[in-house]
Image: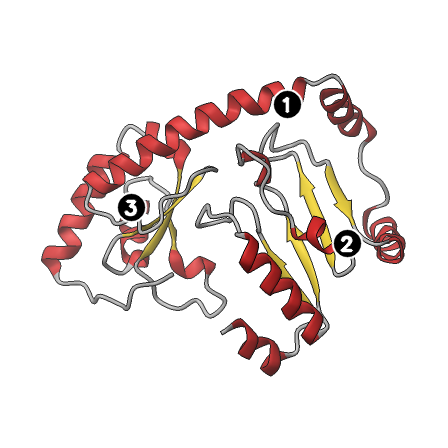
Amino acid sequence: ALERLAAACRPKLFLINSAVHNPTGHTLGAAAAHDLLRLAERHDFLIVEDDTYADFHPGQPIRLAALDRLQRVILVGGYAKTLAAGLRVGVLAARPELIDRLTELKLLAGLTCPPLGEQVVHRLLHEGHYARHLARLRQRVDQARHHCIDALVQCGLTIAHPPHAGMFVWADCHRDSETVTRMAADHGILLAPGALFSPTQAPSTMLRFTVSMVEHPKLWSTLRSILGETESAGFPQPPMGS
């Protein structure tokens, strides 16, 4: 399918979460990574590898940038998800001529980043605090994710491919997820329907859950009630989303 799209649309840029994908939580395997790089070469497009969630992976996930040696891949990442939402410090790796052009665009668009945030991140990395923090953070997120998966299954949702890392669970509620989302919002609960992650906004039965929601006092009772109401009310069932 991707080959057909590349041939038909002739893209210049392809954006991907290769490690701990949002919303599915999956990580790209070696075969798929090599296939994607060959596709980029055949159709002459660049790849932006969004590494934002990769630090939640417990091992060393495959990086397209490493396999490609930064010929067609631009690697971007940051620390807002693992340290603090307000810590707007990022990293970027690309071949030298692209770095020069991107630096010019950065200076034109917003000058420089606040130096205090950069100094904080540098010290955390240099002194080993970040690695120790990540170990504790992964443990807490893993526990919350396992709890979230168990609770979703008990509510009747299906998780075809449970994620092994990260803060998201991609679950099938077997009914129109936008209807479920609207009903949950009436109870003060914010959910993310599958249509949000579709380029065509196609109807979907999928929902993305953030594992921090496991501690929400009303989530599970409200979700069970909504799923029961939508089933008994006979809401239309769109094809299973992905």
Mark 1 residue type? Ala
Mark 3 residue type? Ala
Question: Which residue matches tag 1?
Answer: 131
In the image, residue 122 sits, relative to residue 66, either above or below, namely above
Mark 2 residue type? Leu
Q: Mark 3: few, some, or many residues within 10 Å (few <14, many ≥20)?
A: some
| Residue 86 percent across, percent down from the top left | 64, 32
- Label 3 or label 2, whichever comes before in sequence order: 2
Residue 70 shows which numbered tag? 2
Mark 3 or mark 2: which is in front? 2
| Residue 135 percent across, percent down from the top left | 55, 22
Residue sitting at 53 percent across and 52 percent down?
Answer: 28
Residue found at the far bottom of this picture: 8
- Label 1 or label 3, whichever comes before in sequence order: 1
Residue sitting at 77 percent across and 21 percent down?
Answer: 126
| Residue 113 percent across, percent down from the top left | 80, 37
| Residue 228 percent across, percent down from the top left | 13, 49
Question: Which residue matches tag 3?
Answer: 184
Kind of element beneath mark 3? helix
